Amino acid sequence: MIKISDAEIEVMKVIWEKKEVTSLEIIQKLDDHNWNDNTIRTLINRLIAKKAVGIAKKEGKTYTYVPLIKEDEYKAKRTSSLIKQLHHGSLNEMLLNFVDSNELSKSELKSLLQEIEEKIK
């Protein structure tokens, strides 16, 4: 699995959302992070080097970027890796950890229970 830093994930979220996006559009979307434009361009270049992002086209000095990895596949692999690393591979243990630490609200727990019950049927 490609290792993507937390900052790189923020860039990936924009690319996954837009499907095709320029660096300027990424910079505008991440405006609330107060990152320097060059920092964002560095993150994009790192993602290109990791083969998480590709260049779809170049018009003058403007590049259009596309994701080379699918968001749902990355999330699934990352989640699986975390469960193995932190919870001995037990999804049940991870969920109980969230419940015990009050990370899930009552409404979230009810919603989760409803979804589980629907899957069981």
Image (cartoon, rainbow, N blue to C red):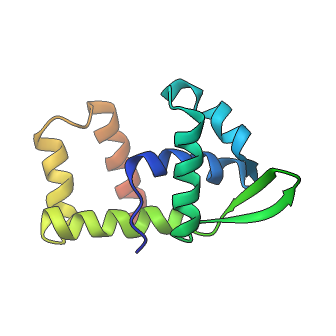
Question: Does residue 52 appear in this view?
Answer: no
Residue 11's x, y, as percent?
55, 47
Question: Does residue 37 appear in this view?
Answer: yes
Tell me where residue 52 sits by quadrant. bottom right
Q: Total of numbered circles in the picture? A: 0
User: Residue drawn at (31%, 69%), measured in percent from left and top?
Assistant: 80
Residue 30's x, y, as percent?
58, 33
User: Residue drawn at (78%, 54%), measured in percent from left and top?
Assistant: 63
Q: Nearer the viewer, residue 56 or 40?
A: 40
User: Residue drawn at (57%, 69%), measured in percent from left and top?
Assistant: 69
Residue 120's x, y, as percent?
36, 66
Q: What quarter of the picture does the C terminus occupy?
A: bottom left
Classify residue 10 as left or right of residue 115. right
Classify residue 29 as left or right of residue 77. right
Q: Residue furthest bottom?
A: 1
Q: Is 54 situated above or below 112? A: below
Q: What quarter of the picture does the N terminus occupy?
A: bottom left
Residue 5's x, y, as percent?
39, 54
Q: Nearer the viewer, residue 104 or 32?
A: 32
Q: Is 108 situated above or below 79? A: above
Q: Nearer the viewer, residue 18 or 46?
A: 46
Q: Is 99 situated above or below 82? A: above
Classify residue 62 as left or right of residue 15. right
User: Residue drawn at (44%, 61%), measured in percent from left and top?
Assistant: 75
